[in-house]
C-alpha cells in the first residue's frame, strides 16, 4: 500500500513538472542559424499584443485610405458645376385636314401653304457638368454639352444659379470653355495627365442622369491611357477609366489621388446607354492647351505639316523591305505644304519627331497638332535604308486636315483575282466613285470580296491603284500583267489614291 502511495506521489510530481516545463517552453522560441547545430533562446512576444497589432494595422490603413477619398471629394466637389442649356427649335405640326389635301382656311386665304405644314416653337433642355478652372469664372466642359445652345446656366456647389456665356469651343477635341461673372468661385487644381499610370485611383464627379444627382462622386482606376480610334473626336488621346460615368457626367472632372484635375469626362462605351465600366476622359494637358488657346485667341490653332500618315504593320514592312514595324509611314504629301517644301516624300518613314520616337500615327498626329504654328520640328526619316534629318517650320492647320484618311465603306459583291476586281479608270467610273479631278493612277478598284485578305487589309472599291509592288502603274494592261505573276500566298504591296490621300496596303493573296 505504501509503495502504491509513493508511486502516485511520484506520478503527480512528474505531471506537475511536465506542466511547468510546458509553460516555460511556451514562452521560448528556438532560433537556428547556419549549418551548425547551435541555437539561442529568446522570449516570445506577447500573443495578445501581436494579435492586437495584426488586427489594428490593416484597419488603420483602411481608415487612412477612406479618409483620403473623403478629402479628395471635399476638396474637388466645390469646383464642379451643373450646366443647363436651352435651345429653341421649330417643330412641324401637321393638321389632320392636310391628309385631304386642303384645310378649311384655304378658301379664305388663297392657295394652301407649301407642303401644308405649320410649325411651333419648342424649347429643348439639356444637362451636363463642368469644372471651374480659374477664380474669375472660366469653366471647362464638353463641347457637346453646350453645342448650339441659345441659353446656358450653371448651378454652383452652394446652389447659386448663374448665367454663363460661351468663350469658345473645339469640336475636334469635344471641349468648350464657358464663363460666368461671379465671385466666390473655387477653381480646381490642374494636374499633369502625362504622369498618369494605369492602375492609379481616380474619382469622377458630375450630375449623372439629372439635377437631383448633382455632384455625384464615383471612384475607380485608370484602366488605360492613350486610347484612340474610339470615334468620338478628331483628336483622341483618351484616358479610360472604370469610375462610373453616365449621361450628365459629360464635362465633369476626373480627379487623381492628389485632388488634381487629370481629365474631362466626355463619353462612355455602352450597349445599353448606361454605365458598363468603360468611360473616357480628355487628358488635362490637352484640355489646358485648348483652354489657353480659346481664352487668348478665341479659337484653337494647331501645327500643320501637310502629310497623311499611317501605321506600319508586318505586311507593309515586308513590302517596303523594312527591318521592323517601327515608325510611321508617310502617304500623301500636300503640294506646297511645309513637308513638301522640306523635301519629305511619299514612302518616307518618320522615326522621330522632336527627339521622341514616332510610335503610332495617332500619337504623331497629336504631337504635330499640339505645336503652335511657326514652331520648328526636327524630323528623323528613313528613306531607302538611309536615315535623313529634316528641320521643318510648321504652319497653321487649315480647316481640312490632310492627316485624316477617310475610309470608304462601300460594300461590293465578290470578285475573282484574289478578291479584287479592277478596271481602267474612265470618266464614267470617276463619276460613279466620285473621284476628284486630276486623280493620279490609271486603275480603279471596282469591287473587293469581303472574305478576301485585301478587304481585311482595308482596300475598298473606289481606291485608285497608283503602284503595284513598288512599280508605278501607267496602264491597266501593266496592272493585269503584274497581277498574273502573283501566286497564291505571295505578298501584294499597293499604293492607292483614296480621295486625294495616298495610302499603302499590304496583304498576302
Image: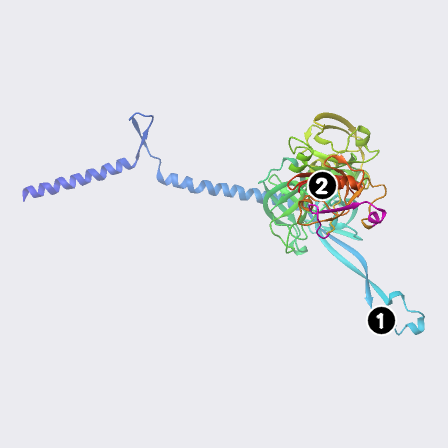
Q: Quadrant of residue 335?
A: top right
> Residue 269 appears at what percent x and percent y?
65, 50
Camera-side residue of 8 and 263: 263
Spatial CA span between label 2 and label 1: 64 Å
In screen coordinates, is 338 left or right of 255? right
Label 2 vs 1, first from the N-terminus: 1
Q: Is residue 262 above or below residue 105?
A: above
Camera-side residue of 46 and 427: 427
Camera-side residue of 229 and 169: 229
> Residue 407 appears at what percent x and percent y?
74, 46
Give the quadrant of the C terminus.
top right
Q: How is the model colour-coded?
A: rainbow
Mark closer to the observer (2, 1): 2
Q: Is residue 429 above or below residue 479?
A: below
Disc 2 crowd, CA 10 A, few/some/many (<14, 14-19, 20+): few
Residue segment shown in magenta: 412-431
| Residue 206 seen in render | yes
- The residue singled out by tag 1 in the image is 98
| Residue 294 seen in render | no
Can residue 162 be found in the magenta stretch?
no
- Residue found at x 77% / y 51%: 152
- The residue singled out by tag 2 in the image is 484
Camera-side residue of 17 and 200: 200
- Residue found at x 9% / y 41%: 6
Q: Is residue 490 above or below residue 96?
A: above
Secondary structure of the residue carrying numbered label 1? helix
> Residue 506 appears at what percent x and percent y?
69, 39
Amino acid at each position: 500500500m505504501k509503495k502504491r502511495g509513493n508511486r502516485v506521489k511520484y506520478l503527480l510530481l512528474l505531471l506537475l513538472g511536465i506542466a511547468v516545463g510546458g509553460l516555460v517552453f511556451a514562452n521560448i522560441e528556438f532560433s537556428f542559424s547556419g549549418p551548425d547545430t547551435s541555437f539561442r533562446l529568446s522570449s516570445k512576444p506577447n500573443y495578445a499584443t501581436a494579435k492586437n497589432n495584426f488586427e489594428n494595422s490593416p484597419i488603420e490603413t483602411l481608415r487612412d485610405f477612406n479618409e483620403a477619398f473623403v478629402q479628395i471629394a471635399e476638396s474637388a466637389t466645390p469646383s464642379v458645376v451643373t450646366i443647363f442649356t436651352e435651345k429653341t427649335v421649330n417643330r412641324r405640326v401637321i393638321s389632320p385636314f392636310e391628309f385631304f389635301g386642303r384645310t378649311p382656311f384655304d378658301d379664305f386665304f388663297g392657295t394652301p401653304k407649301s407642303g401644308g405644314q405649320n410649325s411651333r416653337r419648342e424649347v429643348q433642355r439639356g444637362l451636363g457638368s463642368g469644372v471651374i478652372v480659374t477664380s474669375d469664372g472660366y469653366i471647362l466642359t464638353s463641347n457637346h454639352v453646350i453645342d448650339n445652345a441659345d441659353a446656358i446656366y450653371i448651378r454652383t456647389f452652394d446652389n447659386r444659379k448663374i448665367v454663363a456665356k460661351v468663350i469658345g469651343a473645339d469640336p475636334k477635341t469635344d471641349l468648350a470653355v464657358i464663363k460666368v461673372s461671379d465671385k466666390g468661385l473655387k477653381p480646381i487644381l490642374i494636374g499633369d495627365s502625362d504622369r498618369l499610370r494605369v492602375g492609379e485611383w481616380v474619382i469622377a464627379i458630375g450630375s449623372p442622369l439629372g439635377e437631383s444627382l448633382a455632384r455625384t462622386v464615383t471612384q475607380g482606376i485608370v484602366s488605360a491611357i492613350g486610347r484612340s480610334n474610339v470615334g468620338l473626336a478628331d483628336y483622341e488621346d483618351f484616358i479610360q477609366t472604370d469610375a462610373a460615368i453616365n449621361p450628365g457626367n459629360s464635362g465633369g472632372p476626373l480627379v487623381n489621388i492628389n485632388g488634381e484635375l487629370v481629365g474631362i469626362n466626355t463619353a462612355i462605351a455602352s450597349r445599353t446607354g448606361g454605365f458598363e465600366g468603360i468611360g473616357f476622359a480628355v487628358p488635362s494637358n490637352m484640355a489646358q492647351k485648348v483652354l489657353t488657346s480659346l481664352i487668348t485667341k478665341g479659337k484653337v490653332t494647331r501645327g500643320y505639316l501637310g502629310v497623311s500618315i499611317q501605321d506600319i504593320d508586318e505586311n507593309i514592312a515586308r513590302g517596303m523591305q523594312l527591318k521592323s514595324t517601327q515608325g510611321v509611314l508617310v502617304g500623301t504629301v500636300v503640294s506646297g505644304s511645309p513637308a513638301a517644301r522640306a523635301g519629305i516624300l511619299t514612302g518616307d518613314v518618320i522615326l522621330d519627331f522632336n527627339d521622341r520616337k514616332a510610335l503610332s500615327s495617332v500619337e504623331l498626329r497629336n504631337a504635330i497638332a499640339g505645336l503652335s504654328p511657326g514652331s520648328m520640328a526636327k524630323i528623323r526619316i528613313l528613306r531607302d535604308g538611309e536615315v535623313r534629318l529634316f528641320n521643318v517650320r510648321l504652319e497653321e492647320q487649315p480647316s481640312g486636315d490632310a492627316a485624316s484618311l477617310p475610309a470608304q465603306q462601300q460594300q461590293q459583291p465578290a470578285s475573282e483575282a484574289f478578291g479584287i476586281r479592277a478596271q481602267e479608270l474612265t470618266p464614267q467610273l470617276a463619276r460613279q466613285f466620285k473621284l476628284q479631278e486630276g486623280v493620279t493612277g490609271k486603275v480603279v478598284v471596282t469591287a473587293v470580296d469581303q472574305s478576301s485578305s485585301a478587304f481585311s487589309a482595308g482596300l475598298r472599291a473606289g481606291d485608285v491603284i497608283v503602284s503595284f509592288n513598288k512599280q508605278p502603274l501607267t496602264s491597266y494592261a501593266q496592272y493585269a500583267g503584274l497581277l498574273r505573276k502573283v501566286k497564291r500566298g505571295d505578298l501584294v504591296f499597293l499604293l492607292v489614291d483614296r480621295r486625294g490621300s495616298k495610302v499603302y496596303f499590304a496583304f498576302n493573296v
